[in-house]
C-alpha cells in the first residue's frame, strides 16, 4: 500500500519530526521512502510542512501535491491544503486549534483535540505525537509496534528522557475515538 501524506503546521509544532518518524517506519519495513521538509525562513512560528511517501516501488516524485492523507496542525495549513486531498482520502487535524469548516463530503475527517490532550496529560509539546497516533488509526500505514520502534529510533540519545512521554502521547492518539 502506497502512502502519500502531507503534514503541515507552524514551525515549532513538530511537523518535521512527525514526518521523520512516519518515514522511518517505511525504512524499518525496508520500503522505498521519501521525506521532504519545507519551511519558511522564519522556521519557529513560520509555516512548515513535509511530504512523506512510503511505497514498495520506487518513488517517482517526493513532493506530495495531492495528498491521500493530510495532517493539519493549524488553521492556515488546514485551509491551504484541504482542497488538495484526494477523494477518498483522510484529513487528521488538531481540533483544539482548528475549528474546521469545509464542504468536502468525499473525504474522511479525524478531528482530535491533541493540544488539549497534551496539556491534560502533562505532555506539553507532544500534540504532534498525539496526532501521529491518530493518523495511524485513520490510515494504518504500519503496525503500532513498528511506529513505536520508529519513535525509539528518532528520539535522539541526548533527549532519551523524552522517549517515555513520546510513547505515551503516541498511544493516547492511537486510542482516541471522536
Image (cartoon, rainbow, N blue to C red):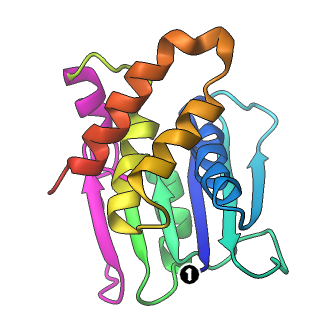
Q: Is residue 47 visible?
A: yes
Image quarter in which the N terminus is found: bottom right
Residue 36 x, y percent position in the rendering: 78, 55
Q: Is residue 27 in the magenta section?
A: no
Q: Residue at x 32, y 29 (%)?
A: 168
Q: Which residue sits furthest left?
A: 178
Residue 162 x/y as whole percent:
49, 16
**Residue 152 located left or right of residue 115:** right
* Residue 102 in picture, x, y percent from top left: 33, 74
Badge 1: few (under 14), some or many (20 or more) residues near its Cα, within 10 Å? few
Q: Secondary structure at mark 1?
A: loop
Is residue 115 one of those drawn in magenta? yes
Q: Nearer the viewer, residue 25 or 126?
A: 25
Q: In this orientation, does residue 101 appear?
A: no
Q: Read off the magenta span.
A: 93-120
For the C terminus, the quadrant is bottom left
* Residue to which mark 1 is pinned: 1
Amino acid at each position: 500500500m502506497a502512502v502519500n501524506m502531507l503534514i503541515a503546521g507552524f514551525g515549532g509544532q513538530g511537523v518535521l519530526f512527525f514526518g521523520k518518524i512516519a518515514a522511518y517506519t517505511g525504512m524499518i519495513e525496508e520500503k522505498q521512502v521519501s521525506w521532504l521538509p519545507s519551511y519558511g525562513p522564519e522556521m519557529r512560528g513560520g509555516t512548515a510542512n513535509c511530504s512523506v511517501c512510503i511505497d514498495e516501488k520506487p518513488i517517482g516524485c517526493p513532493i506530495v501535491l495531492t495528498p491521500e492523507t493530510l495532517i493539519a496542525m493549524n488553521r492556515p495549513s488546514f485551509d491551504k491544503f484541504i482542497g488538495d486531498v484526494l477523494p477518498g482520502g483522510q484529513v487528521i487535524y488538531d481540533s483544539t486549534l482548528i475549528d474546521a469548516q469545509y464542504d468536502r463530503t468525499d473525504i474522511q475527517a479525524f478531528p482530535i483535540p491533541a493540544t488539549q490532550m497534551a496539556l491534560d496529560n502533562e505532555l506539553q509539546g507532544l500534540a504532534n505525537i498525539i496526532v501521529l497516533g491518530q493518523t495511524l488509526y485513520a490510515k494504518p500505514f504500519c503496525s503500532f509496534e513498528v511506529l513505536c520502534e520508529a519513535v525509539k529510533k528518532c528520539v535522539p540519545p541526548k533527549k532519551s528522557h523524552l522517549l517515555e512521554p513520546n510513547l505515551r502521547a503516541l498511544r493516547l492518539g492511537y486510542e482516541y475515538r471522536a
